[in-house]
Amino acid sequence: MVYNICIMSYQGDIFVKKLLYIISFILIISFLLPFCASAHSAPDEISVHDFSGVLSDGIKTYIKSKNDILFSETEAKIIFVTTQDSGEQNINDFCEDLYSNWRISEIGRRNSIFMVVDTKKEEYAFLIGKSIRLALPESDMYKYIVDNFEPHLLKRDYDKAVFATYNAIAKWYEEKYEGLNLNLDNDVFKYVGGEKTKDKDIKESNLWLWIVLIVSLILMVVVLKIKRNIELKIRQHERRVLRKKFKIDIDKITNS
């Protein structure tokens, strides 16, 4: 009987340890996933996305309307993203990850321009579509940014920075694509001063992560409780066996 109890105890310990290892693995993966994933998942319609809440709604509407014309005529877009979520990641790496995860290269003819601005770090990065990199080298793109974006960035006026940069790049498209007319407007004051609605991050909600964590913790508590109950029953059984053995020994002594 004692031998069977020992086997049961040993098997129970192995089972509990395996469960604890599995739960620990799930918890570790759950904590690591947010760091492996991109900060923002792709919106349904990619154009201008203000996750920092620094752009006036009028500016965003202007860019979206011009991007609609640009895309219908050339299948290109000039995409701006503001964020505060690049974390410890280098802004260039963050931009590349977002570019890849949002599949910007699959938009139209791979002739779009993608720019990310981290308003917390006051840093930016950009990527040029493969099919226009010869026509628009990085040196020219930097000139557009230095002339149009950086002067306003120093004042943290993101409305004017994005507006001026968009128009400068859009003019390049007008020059390169014959017959393209975006009806650009240089009067930024028509579009600023209104509400600055922070775009909702439509990345997969962290709700699933919390569910996994909570379920894992509950399982861990349950497993530990089961383990304690098993150990308690084993100790109780061992006591009964010892009492019975002790009684038998006393009876033998008495009878002798």
Image: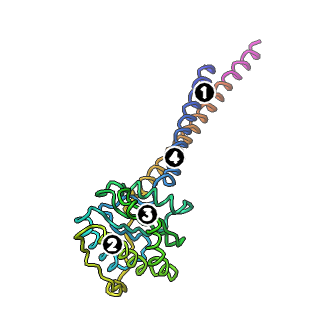
* Nearest to the observer: residue 11 or residue 23: 23
Q: Which residues are magenta?
A: 244-256
Question: What residue lies at 49% left-to-right and 72% top-to-bottom?
Answer: 119
Q: Amino acid at mark 1?
A: Tyr
Residue 239 in percent (x, y) is at: 66, 29
Question: What residue lies at 55% left-to-right and 43% top-to-bottom?
Answer: 24
Residue 126 in percent (x, y) is at: 45, 64
Question: What residue lies at 47% left-to-right and 81% top-to-bottom?
Answer: 152
Residue 153 in percent (x, y) is at: 49, 78
Question: Which label was assigned to residue 29?
Answer: 4
Element under disc 1 = helix
Residue 61 in percent (x, y) is at: 30, 76
Nearer-N-terminus badge (4/1)? 1
Question: Which label was assigned to residue 170?
Answer: 2
Nearer-N-terminus badge (2/4)? 4
> For this view, does 203 lie left or right of residue 146?
left
Nearer-N-terminus badge (3/1)? 1
Q: Marks 2 and 4, Cα distance to the nearest angstrom?
A: 44 Å
Q: Which residue is mark 3?
A: 137
Q: Amino acid at mark 2?
A: Ala
Residue 133 position by quadrant: bottom left
Pair 4/1: label in front: 4
